[in-house]
Image (tube, rainbow, N blue to C red):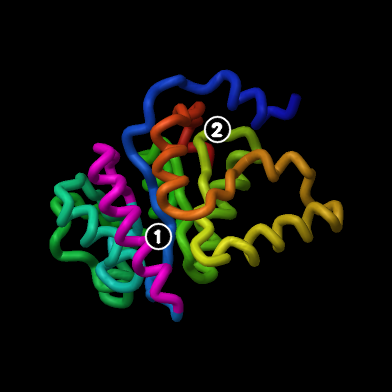
Amino acid sequence: MAESQTLRHMGSMSRIQAVAVFCGSRTGRNPAWRAAARALGEGLAASGLHLVYGGGRIGLMGEIADAALAAGGAVTGVIPDFLMRREVAHAGLAALEVTGSMHARKQRMFELADAFVMLPGGIGTYDETVEILTWGQLGLHAKPVLICDVAGSARAFVAAIDAAIEADFTPPGVRALFEVLPGVPAVLDRLARVSGGAGGDAARL
């Protein structure tokens, strides 16, 4: 059994309490993506789950944060100092952590979260999600990673991973490191049922 699969069986059975969401700093062309971000923010708040996200108030990041806050949810933003202006740091957050680098941002989000959700986004969203999957492949954690497929948004991401598997650059077992779910209701239902996995040592990331 691969090390990452072993960690899944050894992981904590604790209930998920905090969810890191990776999503776009733009809203994209499809109104369904904005609606999904708002629905997820509201859903996390209603479920008593703490939202951890990139700290901006623009794009889908702003939509999910605004929706969670309006619904009374707990929200923590994590943003690098050099993006405070570009991503327009959210002024309405009670908890906004400023890091010195992009890597430190991802590391801190990893530390704060029990699970990860990918909403639609660009290469930054892909980067964050792929790095979390890479850490899982290396056996550094076994936290759940859920890909929210909104109007086909996950298709290209999954195709890229499948292409790497087909080319034998990535083992087929990587597909077990994440789940693709058809929309926000399915993601919220899965978060209510899945247990947090082994957290790993963030200092090794």
69 or 78, nearer to the observer: 69
78 or 166, nearer to the observer: 166
Amino acid at circle 1: Ser
Crowding at dot 1, Cα within 10 Å, few <14 / some 14-19 / many 20+, comes out as some
Horizontal relation, residue 26 to residue 68: left or right: right
Query: Mark 1 or mark 2: which comes first in sequence?
Result: 1
**Residue 58 appears in the picture as rendered:** yes
Q: Magenta stretch: give its range.
A: 30-52
Residue 138 vs 122, above or below: the answer is: above
Q: Residue at left 34%, top 53%?
A: 40
Question: SS for tag 2?
Answer: loop
Residue 64, percent across and down? 30, 60
Residue 111 vs 78, above or below: the answer is: above
Crowding at dot 2, Cα within 10 Å, few <14 / some 14-19 / many 20+, comes out as many
Q: Give the numbered dot on residue 142.
A: 2
Q: Residue at left 46%, top 27%?
A: 195
Amino acid at circle 2: Ala
How far apart are the two marked residues, 1 and 2, measured between alpha carbons?
A: 24 Å
Which part of the image, by quadrant, shows the N terminus?
top right
**Residue 79 appears in the picture as rendered:** no
Question: SS for tag 1?
Answer: loop
Q: Give the numbered dot on residue 101.
A: 1
Q: Is residue 40 magenta?
A: yes
